[in-house]
Amino acid sequence: MKRHVAATMACGLALALAAILLVGCAPKPQPPSLTPTPKPTLTKKFKVCISTRPGQWNLDERRRGYVETFAKYYPEIEVVQTIDDETKYETGESRGGAVLNSYPDLAAFCGLNAASGPGVAQAVKNAGKVGQVTIVAMDADSAILDLIQEGVITASVAQRQYKMSYLGVKYLFGLNHGIYRVAGDKSKPNLPEIPAVLDTGTVEVNKQNVDKFRTPSQGAAEEMTPEQKTLPGGVRPKPDPDEQYVVIGISTGVEYWNACRAGLEDACVYFGLDPQKSEFTGPPDQNPEKQADMMSAIIGRKPSGILIAPGRAETLAPYIDKAIEKGIPTLTIDTDSPDSKRYSYIGTSNYDAGVTGAHILARALGATKVEATAPTPSAAKGPE
Amino acid sequence: MPEAPASQTQQASTLQRFGLAGRRLLGLRELVTLCILLLVVLYFHFSTHRADTPLWRSDFLSGSNMSVVLVSACNQGIVAVGMTIVIVAGGFDLSVGSVLALAGLVCAKLLKLELPLFTALAGGLTLGCAAGLINGVIVTRAQVNPLIATLGMMTICRGLVLVDVSTHGATTNLPAPFTALAAEWHRIPGAGVVFTMLVLMILGDLFLRNSRWLRQVYYIGGNERAARLSGINVEGVRTATYVLCGILAALAGIMNTARFNAATYEAGQGLELQVIAAVVIGGASLAGGQGSVFGAALGVFLMNCISIGLTLIRVAPAWQLVATGIVLIAAVSLDMFITRRRAAS
């Protein structure tokens, strides 16, 4: 019996130590019930929870866009908690469910990655709060489109990854055939420049237009004008027999990249490239080191050009520089490595994606918009 | 000497029975995990208690939050039943997460081909069975280390999912009879999945304790040579444990797909380590010969209570990982300390 008493005391001590560590390490505000109830204010009407993968810089930028937009334009909206969904439906479901218990009057969830929306949507369904809790998701994966159709998710912010790869191949092809020059290259003043940074923008997906996104390009191919799809002057030089372009993504297991792949394939078809030679590749998980190894191998093959979505800017920068030094034109897409020698970045301004999402959410909630004193910064837009 | 009255004799034997049961209970290895779970529950209960509500009510111990805990534990809980048996037999299976994803995908694909529900379910379970059989044969016949064998299977299964998803995207919009398997029932969200998990845990524990055939895994895990010399078909039993684990991983995958109405690449990622951790917390030894499904269940619920409790008290996401790791190490260390003291005495 004494051993069991000792065991129980030991358990208690271990837990007490863990509890002290938890409280000490995480100076978060107490749950509402343990602090004096603040006087109700007219401004904080809508409680919102953000579901994301903290520490991933593109998601952190989106979160910043959301939070700063709420602060600047919608004082009625309060972000009460941010949860780590680990980019998995199940984790978003369980932690989203806990938040719904913590805040029974929660007005909305914002999902910042493709898995966030379906995860918190399931939590809302489990709690029987469909129609009571607004959800704004990210991207246009099939599961998100289905949930928008069902009315569980109100809207989503879709990126145009098809355009990233299509335009990327177009610029690389144009560079290789003397149709474009790199931004800042004064040696060929007569040629048009490729943009140093091109924001491909985002589109709101809602119940009215959801079917438009059920194509391989998620509707982006149909949006592009003939001028955007073709080279200046409509020229179409004959490609070299061995001409090939490689797109290196990251976390390529997610459905998001399928539209990017479609952009590469369509560009190959349009410019007469052998689709067997060009390639979409990349590690299936968020593994920048493996991506760097893959890029090393690809540089050794000397492709005609590389489009890369760096998993971590600092890790991939030396490899991008090495490719450029070996004469392989390299652009970044989807995420940037601004300190590298890349010729151009074509992608979404993640901050602006957050801003767009915030405005969509505020409109859905009916939050009052106040005028801001300063414009919201965004990525520079360039000619397509 | 006069005999004691019948009522006194009856009372004494009742007390003896209670005493015996009490000693059996207190002798359980799982007692430590149970104590830790209770302490964790109490901690989160008092941390989330609202001042204007009765003492016995809190956000953590509310019905809706308990259903969140149960639903979130489903994947781990179902897989933990099979993993316990594999670990007790002296092995482990790293492929469970990937088998979960692939089985869910296979089931979804068969449904999309408009095959009957039963056929689709059988297809998914057959895949799990096949994966487990291959694992078992490679480990027992080819004598490959379980780490390598199941790591290889993990990569193959995840790769096959990637091949499909990268071509066709996630498989979604599945027929209503299938998604109804995980639908709400009498206001219990995911009732089908939760009941499946609980039934499997109860049956798994009962069979592992009482089934003569299944108890062989303890002898194999405890002393393989002695088990072989006593006539146990070590290879056969061990292979069977991998098959069972594969089938249960596939079942979890099918339920997961039904719940989210989607078969995705990310399903089950990281599940293997979570389940192994839960099984070990529950008292199993990675060396084999020890463990129970009841203990694994406690481990699963402990980990999920911590995850959800930390979310409720708004610990920053980054610190949640740290806190979870500390509690897990403390729980396992304490258990090992008490076990060694018991063995020494």
Image: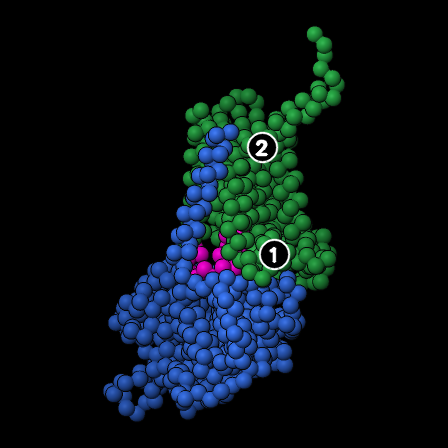
Chain colours: A blue, B green
- At which x and y percent is residue A271? 44, 80
Q: What residue type is labelled 2?
A: Leu
Q: Is residue B6 magenta?
A: no
**Mark 2 touching mark 1, by CB under 8 A?**
no
Give the mark, 2 or 1, whose residue is nearer the N terminus: 2
Residue denoted by label 2: B25
- At which x and y percent is residue B311? 50, 59
Specify whether B51 is left or right of A13.
right
Vertical position of residue A162 compared to residue A252: above or below: below
Chain bearing tag 1 is: B
Q: Which quadrant of the figure contains the C terminus of chain A?
A: bottom left
Span of residues in magenta: B303-321
Q: Is residue B320 magenta?
A: yes
In this view, the residue in front, A189 or A351, is: A351
Residue denoted by label 1: B54
Specify whether A170 is left or right of A157.
left
Say if residue A177 shows up in the picture.
Answer: no
Q: What residue type is labelled 1?
A: Pro
Which residue is found at the position 52% from the left and 41% from the top? B35
In this view, the residue in front, A267 or A59, is: A59
